[in-house]
Image (cartoon, helix red, strand yellow):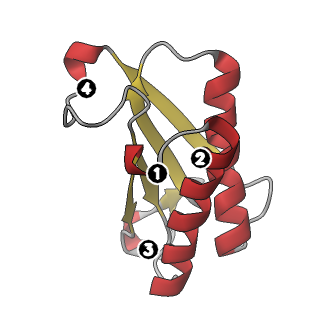
């Protein structure tokens, strides 16, 4: 059950934003084997004054935070990063240098689902 949060500049169309989420989801299904229904994703858009990044990045720059159950291998995580970045590049022409991905793996005791602690 990956939780996906994308931070990006405001101004992209609803179709463009949906395509971003689709690219990320496909990368996760292909690399981590998650189920197709397992989509817990959100995009948070920022005004230019509220989203600071290096001047050599374009306005397509985004930060993608993936929160995963622990247990994936380094290879699986690397494959997810590569698959997501490649998909964003091929489907939306987002330069790979404009994609920053962070993977968090909180312990299972930090997950609550349906009113129950996961661990």
Q: Earlier in the sequence, mark 2 or mark 3?
A: 2
Residue that mark 2 sits on: 89
Residue at mark 1 to residue at mark 3: CA–CA distance: 31 Å
Name the front one of labels 4 and 1.
1
Mark carried by residue 51:
4
Q: Residue at x 30, y 36 (%)?
A: 57
Which image quadrant is residue 12 in? top right
Local SS, label 4: loop
Q: Position of residue 16 (x, y in %)?
A: 64, 25
Whole-angstrom CA distance, mark 1 to mark 2, is 6 Å
* Tag 2 and tag 4, C-beta contact below 8 Å: no
Instruction: For the residues labelled 1 and 2, say whether their Cβ atoms are less than 8 Å apart.
Output: yes
Q: Name the residue under label 3.
A: 108
Q: Is residue 109 left or right of residue 80?
A: left
User: 21 or 110, which is in the foreground?
Assistant: 21
Q: Distance of mark 4 from mark 1, alpha carbons?
A: 19 Å
The secondary element bearing badge 1 is classed as helix
For the residues carrying marks 2 and 4, which lies nearer the camera in this image? Answer: 2
**Rounded to the nearest whole Å, what is the CA distance between mark 2 and mark 4?**
22 Å
Q: Name the residue under label 1.
A: 96
Question: Who's the residue at 60% across and 57% down the image?
Answer: 86
Question: Residue 100 at x, y = what percent?
Answer: 37, 51
């Amino acid at each position: 059950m990956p939780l996906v949060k994308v931070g990006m500049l405001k101004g992209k169309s609803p179709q463009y934003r949906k395509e971003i989420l689709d690219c990320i989801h496909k990368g996760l299904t292909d690399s981590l084997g998650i189920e197709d229904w397992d989509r817990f994703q959100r995009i948070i858009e920022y005004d230019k004054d509220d989203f600071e990044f290096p001047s050599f990045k374009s306005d397509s720059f985004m930060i993608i935070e993936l929160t995963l159950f622990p247990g994936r291998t380094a290879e699986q995580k690397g494959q997810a990063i590569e698959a997501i970045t490649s998909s964003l590049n091929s489907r939306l022409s987002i330069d790979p240098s404009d994609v920053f991905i962070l993977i968090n793996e909180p312990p299972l005791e930090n997950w609550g689902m349906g009113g129950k602690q996961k661990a």
